[in-house]
Image (spheres, grey):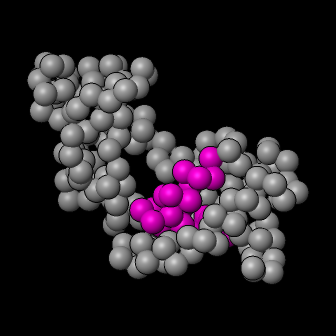
């Protein structure tokens, strides 16, 4: 059974927890007793468990609000898929950004490839989309700011953060 996200509710809940989440970030960086590898293992396990109950296609909020970046190889791959030149693909869908690895991002939100809450270029989507919301990336402690920022757009991130607070003993701490 997958949960269908209520995007208005998740934004409100994330806003309500904003101060607590920043305290949790400080806790993770300076008070949590887990070593980085142990922390990452627990983040991965929690993510796997949470993700099993959430249907991303019922939400697609990341595709509605986040502008993925594109490498030259990704531009080439998607242009071929769509039967257009690389320059036409860039002109139609992308704008330049200052990034040496991924020098373009989508011009608009929602993503121009979103169709009925599904990616129309899913098999060829850029790495930014493949990895989102980046909970399976190592060194969670160094990425908590980005994770906290994603709590208002991604139900999975919101739920993982809430579970980690419980798992790591943060929720039992006295609040200022």
Number of marks: 0
Name the residue located 71 percent from the left edge and 49 percent from the top edge: 141
Name the residue located 81 percent from the left edge and 71 percent from the top edge: 169
Relative to 14, 63 lies left or right: left
Q: Which range is magenta? A: 143-163
Relative to 41, 125 lies left or right: left
Write down the quadrant of residue 120 in the picture.
top left
Q: Magenta stretch mostly in which secondary structure?
A: helix
Do we see residue 134 in this rendering?
A: yes
Name the residue located 59 percent from the left edge and 53 percent from the top edge: 145
The picture places residue 113, in percent across and down from the top left corner, at: 21, 45
In the figure, 37 relative to 171: above or below?
above
Name the residue located 56 percent from the left edge and 70 percent from the top edge: 18
The picture places residue 93, in percent across and down from the top left corner, at: 17, 35
150 within the magenta span: yes
The picture places residue 112, in percent across and down from the top left corner, at: 19, 45
Task: Point out the residue furthest to the right here.
Answer: 33
User: Which of the image's four quarters has the C terminus?
Assistant: bottom right
Task: Point out the residue furthest to the front here.
Answer: 176
Looking at the image, which is closer to me, 164 or 98? 98
144 within the magenta span: yes
Looking at the image, which is closer to me, 105 or 40? 105
The picture places residue 158, in percent across and down from the top left corner, at: 54, 67
Do we see residue 3 in this rendering?
A: no
Write down the quadrant of residue 99 in the picture.
top left
């Amino acid at each position: 059974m997958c949960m269908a996200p209520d995007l208005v509710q998740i934004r409100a809940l994330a806003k309500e927890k904003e101060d607590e989440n920043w305290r949790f970030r400080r806790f993770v960086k300076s008070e949590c007793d887990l070593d980085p590898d142990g922390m990452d293992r627990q983040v991965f396990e929690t993510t796997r468990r949470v993700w099993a109950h959430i249907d991303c296609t019922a939400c697609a909020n990341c595709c509605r609000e986040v502008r993925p970046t594109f490498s030259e190889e990704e531009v080439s791959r998607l242009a071929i898929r769509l039967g257009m030149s690389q320059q036409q693909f860039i002109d139609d869908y992308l704008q330049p950004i200052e990034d040496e690895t991924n020098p373009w991002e989508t011009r608009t939100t929602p993503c121009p490839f979103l169709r009925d809450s599904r990616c129309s270029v899913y098999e060829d989507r850029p790495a930014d989309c493949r990895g989102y919301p980046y909970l399976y990336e190592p060194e969670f402690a160094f990425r908590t700011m980005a994770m906290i920022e994603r709590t208002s757009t991604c139900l999975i991130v919101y739920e993982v953060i809430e579970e980690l607070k419980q798992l790591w003993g943060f929720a039992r701490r006295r609040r200022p």
